[in-house]
Image (cartoon, rainbow, N blue to C red):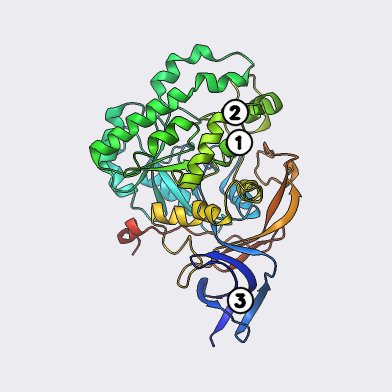
Amino acid sequence: MNSFDTIFRRGTVVNHHGIHETDIGVENGRITALGNLSRAASKAVIDCKGLHILPGVVDTQVHFREPGLTHKEDLESGSRGAVLGGVTGVFEMPNTNPLTTTRETFEEKIAAAKNRMHCDFAFYVGGTHSNVAELPILERLPGCAGVKVFMGSSTGSLLVQDDDGVEAILNAISRRAAFHSEDEYMLEERKDLRVQSDPSSHPVWRSPEVALNCTKRLVALAHKTGKRIHVLHISTGEEIAFLADHKDVASVEVTPHHLTLDNTAYARLGTYAQMNPPVRDKSHQDQIWAGVANGVADILGSDHAPHTREEKEHAYPDSHSGMTGVQTLVPIMLNHVNEGSLSLERFVDMTSHGPNRLFGIVGKGRIAVGYDADLTIVDMKRRETITNDWIASRAGWTPYDGVTVTGWPVGTIVRGHKVMWDGELVTPSTGQPMRFSEALTAQT
C-alpha cells in the first residue's frame, strides 16, 4: 500500500462513481487513490466522517477589481472570501484599471496573483476593437481563461456593442469566448425609463427584450463564424428558451442571485439589489430554475462584483451595479439543495464538472486519480446565518445578511493544501494559475 501525504478518511464523496463513503489518498497535491485506505500510511489524516466531499468548486465569474479599484476588492481579499466560502478556483474578469487587454497587463495580474491569492485562478482577457489582432496570442497565454466581451455597458469601459466588432473578435479566436449580453443600443434608447431614486426601475430600463435581443444577435454571429460562445448571467426566461435551441454554439451561465432574489428585493435592499443584468420578477426566476432542471443551464457563476457602501448608496441611477457573491455561492446553493430545488449531483455538475467540460481546465473538476486534490468539504446539515461580518470582501456586505441557510462549507483544499478549515485560514496563500487543454502549447 502506498504512503500518502494526506488521507481524507470516511467522507461521503460525490464523484463520477456516485455518492458514497470512501477515502481519498493525496500525494504531491494530486489524488492518487480512492477506496479503503485504512491500512495505508500517511503523514496526515483528516477525518471527514459525516461530511460530504465535493470536487473543488470553481467560480467562473468574479471581479476582484485589481488593479486600479482596490478600495473595494483586491486579489488577496477576493480570494480569501472564495476559500472561506469553499471555492477552490476562480475565473477573474478584465474590467480593471488599466483594462486587462494586453500581454503586459495580463502578465502583471498573473505575477500579482501567484502565491498571493488563496485559491487557484485564471484571468480573462478583454476583447476590444483595438486588440483583435493580438487575441489569438493572448487567449493562449498561461493562466488565460479566454476572451471576455461586454456587448452592453456595465462597470468599467470595456464595450464592443456592434456586430462587426463582435464578429471580428470571434473570427480571430479559437477558444470559447464569454459575453455580457445586453443590447447597448437599446440601453441608450431606454435611459429615460430610469426613475430617479427608484432602483426598481432598473429591470424596466434593462428589460428582458434588451437581453434577449443581444443574445439573438450573439448566437447568429456564433453560427456565422462557427465559434463557441458562453453567455453569462442569464436573467430571463426567454433567453433560456431561446438558448435551448442553440446548444451547438452556446453554453449558459446562471447565477445564485438570479435564482434566489426577485424583484421584491428592491423594496428590502434598495440599490444593494442592483445588478447588470437585473434581478427580475419571479416568473423569470422560475424559468431559470427550469433551465437548471432540464440542463439548458451549464454552470453557476457568482458574478461577484463588489462596490463600497458609499458607491451602492448613491441615489439611483448613479448607484453602482454589482454585489458580492463568491463567498456565498456555496452556502446559498447548498440551501437550495436542501430545499429540493436541485440535487447535490447537479450542483457539482454546475460548479466542478461543468467548468472542466466547457473550458478544458486541466486536472480540475473531478475527484479522480490523476486530478488535482481540489476539494470542497461541506456539512449538509449545518445551519448558519450569513452576516456582513463574515464577508471577507473589502466591500464588507452581502445581500444575504441575516439569511439562515442549511449546508455550509467547512473545508477548502487546494492542490492538497488545507487552506480553510471550519472558518479559519490555516495555510499561507499558494494560489497558482490554472492550465487549459486548448492552450497547453503555450505552457510548455
Residue 274, disc: 2
Q: Residue at x 61, y 30 (%)?
A: 262
Q: Amino acid at mark 3?
A: Ile
Which residue carries the number 1 mark? 323
Q: Nearer the viewer, mark 1 or mark 3?
A: 3
For the residue marked with disc 2, what is the amino acid? Gln
In x, y percent, where is residue 107? 42, 50
Tell me residue 222's x, y (percent): 29, 38
How far is the residue under mark 1 from the one under mark 3?
A: 37 Å
The residue indicated by pointer 3 is: 7
Q: Is residue 184 left or right of residue 316?
A: left
Residue at 32% from the left image edge and 58% from the top image edge: 442
Q: Earlier in the sequence, mark 1 or mark 3?
A: 3
Q: Choose the circle earlier in sequence order: 1 or 2.
A: 2
Q: Tell me the crowding category of disc 2: few under 14, some 14 to 19, or many 20 or more residues within 10 angstroms, Cα based.
A: many
Q: Check the picture and name the quadrant holding the C terminus.
A: bottom left
